[in-house]
Image (tube, rainbow, N blue to C red):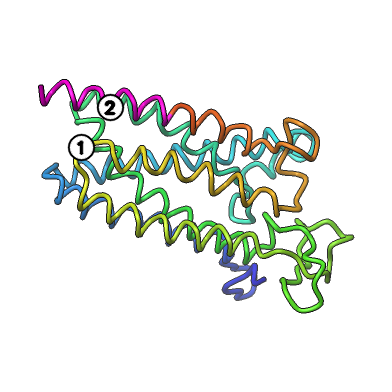
Amino acid sequence: MYPELIKLGPFTIHTYGFLIAVGFLSALSVARRLAILSKLNPDRVLDMAFWVLLVGFVGARALYIVTRFQYFAQEPLAMFKVWEGGLVFLGGPLAALPFLIWYTRKYKFPIWKVLDIGAPCLALAHMFGRFGCLASGCCYGKPTGSTWYGIRLYSEFVDRQYHGILLHPTQLYEATALGLLFIGLLVIFKRKVFDGQVALSYFLVYPAIRSIIEIFRGDLIRGFVVDETISTSQFLSIFIFVGAAIALWYRLKQVHQQKV
């Protein structure tokens, strides 16, 4: 846990905010490269990627605020302290996807090609975000029950009963899974047989990753649909997975009709 990267008097660079920025810039760099490979205008795609990532960030923050509404109702200015941590990732895609659909229609972009570009970028940016979570001490895991395995956290985000106890490093679990997903999506991108294959692969695989990792999470503030049984993220993951499966069926049907 290393919440402050640099502190010089009143000037502080928070590790969480720094890693979010690194993830943001890395994703933009990958988006530009994939746009060139897709034979799309890289500058226009870069503009679009910037706004999509920004809208997604706002959506992730908004969903976090909803899950901790009572706290933010008492401390409204804390809503803007994003550098200290506090995002519910699935709020990002839920906000960004409608914006992306609107943007592609306005500028006449091929939606499936654009989604294929965005999926690896999203996984990459998210991976850096999870490293930021580890640095700030949020999104932590349950006690491992081991005497040797786990991490000890002492941040204000961690319930005091868990201070100094070995916890599952769920931040590292997810960061690792996202790194592998990013690599896998790039492989699919190079070998895809139809547009949309990369994006739909992401929306099928990530909900499964998130739902499994949620089992090891110990932070109750992330919110639950069914108390301590089905978290907000697991609940949303069900709909995302089903939606992706339906979209895959529809896309495969379209591709088949085009070949006939």
Quadrant of res 228: top right
In the image, residue 201 sits, relative to residue 179, either above or below, namely above
Residue 152 point in image, percent of width and height = 76, 71
User: Going 23% across and 42% down the picture, which residue do you hit?
Assistant: 45
Please report whichever mark, 1 or 2, sits nearer to the chain's N-terminal start: 1
Report if the CB atoms under discs 1 and 2 are less than 8 Å apart: yes
| Residue placed furthest toward the right | 161
162 to the left or right of 152? right
User: Going 68% across and 57% down the picture, which residue do you hit?
Assistant: 138
In the image, residue 146 sits, relative to residue 59, either above or below, namely below
Q: Identify the disc placed on residue 204.
A: none
Q: In this figure, which residue is indicated by the disc labeled 1?
A: 194
Quadrant of res 223: top right
Q: In which quarter of the image is the N terminus?
A: bottom right
Q: Is residue 81 magenta?
A: no
Q: Identify the disc placed on residue 251.
A: 2
The prevailing secondary structure element of the residues shown in magenta is: helix
Quadrant of res 250: top left
In the image, residue 247 sits, relative to residue 228, either above or below, namely above
Residue 190 point in image, percent of width and height = 20, 53
User: Going 42% across and 30% down the picture, which residue do you hit?
Assistant: 245
- Under mark 1, the amino acid is Phe
65 to the left or right of 250? right
Q: Bin the neighbour count of mark 1 within 10 Å (Cα to Cα): few under 14, some 14-19, many 20 and up.
A: some
The front one of 79 and 248 is 248
User: Going 71% across and 36% down the picture, which residue do you hit?
Assistant: 230
Q: Is mark 2 on a helix, strand or loop?
A: helix
Could you give the CA–CA distance between mark 1 and mark 2, rounded to whole angstroms?
9 Å
Residue 241 point in image, percent of width and height = 49, 33
The magenta segment is 244-260
